[in-house]
């Protein structure tokens, strides 16, 4: 089901007048996205601040700015890695609206340049953009931005984006690789098709009951940096589209697919049947991460290079015995000092990068 956007008429330059009433109905609807109920009702989320706004605009341009498309990035040494990591259309958030203080944009010329490019596409009379590609743009006063946003101090820009509805029935195709038809829109308005092959997921964190928004956002950001193909959350985890999570992820919501509410038993059975392994980060694991990383243990090092889903447990209680039983192996992280344990986001970084380094070495 496609969420209802904030505005769906074809935009015009006249649409961008100043929004100065913090008690307007529109401002209230955007502010409601700070709550889980508001996000569930509207199927939208807030992306507040320069980093997520920058990435939201860049993602929109990759899809709609001619002659580039979401799935076809021009060949060059600098963009080959980017193309390989782009998620298929429909698996990442779509920009729906942008509210900004022009004075804030002056402090971020790169974002201002991106917005100018977006305007050039939106307001081009020769372009017939699809309904979902249209963006509602508004200049807004600092008071309005503060009323709509969730951050303690407004940073002068706030994007509203559509939440991808990733259930297991659609996620399974992403996990094992897929072929997708991509359409390129030329400057003359004509289209040409191509087929884009997406590789199977090689690395992913699976968050089982993580509750702290900062931890969840940091894991999403770390997974993005490590080249993970998806971030998966089981029921009972915090909402990955909450404002604090989005801020902590620093724009990574627009780089890596995020699937919430995924049944762990179903996921484990599926990925293991398709050649991947599930490793549980467990302080009492039978094998240590240091052992698996040892340069003198070729077999163990190759073990980390396999397609891997890292299972990470709740901050206070860790993984349950039932969750550990779904893993192929339990892996501990050695502690050389006196700390009882590691923060789960730190543990996630160590585990994900151990796999990423091994995978890139082999």
Image: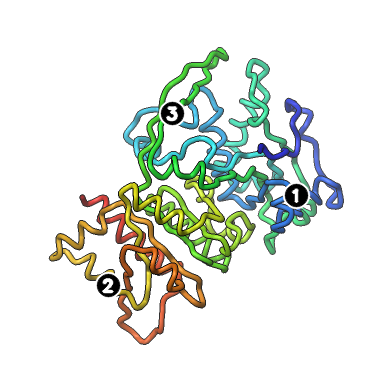
Q: Disc 2 versus disc 3: distance between alpha carbons?
A: 41 Å
In the picture provided, is 279 more to the left or to the right than 260? left
The colour scheme used to paint the residues is rainbow
In the picture provided, is 104 more to the left or to the right than 295? right
- In the rendered image, residue 256, in percent from the top left (x then y), is placed at 47, 47
Q: The N terminus is located in which quarter?
A: top right
Mark 2, residue position: 288
Residue at the bottom extreme of this rendering: 338
Residue at position x 49%, y 77% in the image: 317
Residue at position x 72%, y 55% in the image: 149
Q: Tags 3 and 1 in contact by the CB under 8 Å rule?
A: no
Q: Nearer the viewer, residue 134 or 105?
A: 134
Q: What element does badge 3 sit on?
A: loop
208 over 68 or under it: above or below: below
Q: Based on the displayed image, in which of its 4 quarters is residue 65 positioned?
A: top right
Mark closer to the chain start, 1 or 2: 1
- In the rendered image, residue 191, in percent from the top left (x then y), is placed at 52, 16
- Disc 3 packing (10 Å; few <14; some 14–19; many ≥20): some
Q: Nearer the viewer, residue 287 or 255?
A: 287
Mark closer to the chain start, 3 or 1: 1
- In the rendered image, residue 60, in percent from the top left (x then y), is placed at 57, 35
Mark 1, residue position: 30
- Disc 2 packing (10 Å; few <14; some 14–19; many ≥20): some
Residue at position x 33%, y 55% in the image: 308
- In the rendered image, residue 76, in percent from the top left (x then y), is placed at 34, 31
Q: What element does badge 1 sit on?
A: helix
Q: Disc 3 versus disc 1: distance between alpha carbons?
A: 33 Å
314 over 124 or under it: above or below: below
Residue at position x 40%, y 69% in the image: 324
Q: Disc 1 versus disc 2: distance between alpha carbons?
A: 46 Å
Mark 3, residue position: 72
């Amino acid at each position: 089901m496609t969420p209802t956007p904030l505005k769906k008429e074809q935009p015009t330059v006249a649409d961008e007048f100043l929004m100065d009433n913090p008690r307007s109905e529109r401002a209230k609807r955007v502010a409601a996205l700070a709550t889980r109920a508001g996000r569930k009702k509207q199927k939208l989320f807030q992306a507040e601040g320069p980093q997520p706004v920058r990435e939201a605009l860049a993602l929109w341009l990759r899809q709609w700015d001619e002659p580039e498309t979401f799935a076809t990035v021009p060949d060059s040494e600098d963009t080959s890695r980017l193309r390989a990591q782009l998620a298929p259309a429909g698996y990442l958030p779509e920009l729906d609206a942008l509210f900004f203080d022009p004075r804030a944009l002056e402090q971020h010329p790169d974002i201002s340049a991106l917005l100018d490019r977006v305007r050039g596409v939106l307001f081009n009379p020769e372009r017939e953009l699809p309904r979902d590609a249209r963006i509602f743009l508004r200049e807004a006063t600092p008071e309005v931005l503060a009323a709509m946003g969730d951050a303690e101090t407004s940073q002068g820009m706030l994007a509203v984006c559509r939440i991808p509805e990733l259930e297991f029935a659609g996620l399974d195709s992403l996990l094992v690789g897929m072929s997708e038809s991509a359409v390129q829109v030329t400057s003359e308005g004509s289209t040409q098709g191509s087929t884009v092959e997406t590789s199977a997921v090689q690395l992913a964190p699976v968050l089982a009951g993580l509750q702290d928004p900062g931890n969840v956002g940091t894991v999403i950001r770390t997974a993005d940096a490590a080249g993970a193909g998806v971030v998966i959350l089981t029921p009972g985890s915090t909402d990955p589209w909450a404002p604090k999570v989005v801020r902590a992820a620093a724009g990574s919501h627009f780089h890596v697919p995020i699937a919430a509410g995924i049944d762990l038993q179903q996921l484990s059975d599926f990925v293991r049947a398709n050649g991947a392994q599930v490793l549980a980060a467990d302080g009492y694991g039978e094998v240590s991460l240091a052992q698996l990383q040892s340069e003198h243990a070729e077999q163990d090092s190759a073990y980390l290079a396999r397609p891997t889903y890292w299972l990470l447990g709740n901050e206070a209680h860790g993984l349950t015995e039932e969750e550990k039983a779904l893993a192929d192996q339990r892996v501990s992280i050695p502690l050389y000092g006196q700390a009882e344990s590691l923060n789960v986001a730190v543990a996630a970084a160590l585990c994900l990068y151990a796999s990423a380094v091994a995978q890139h070495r082999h």
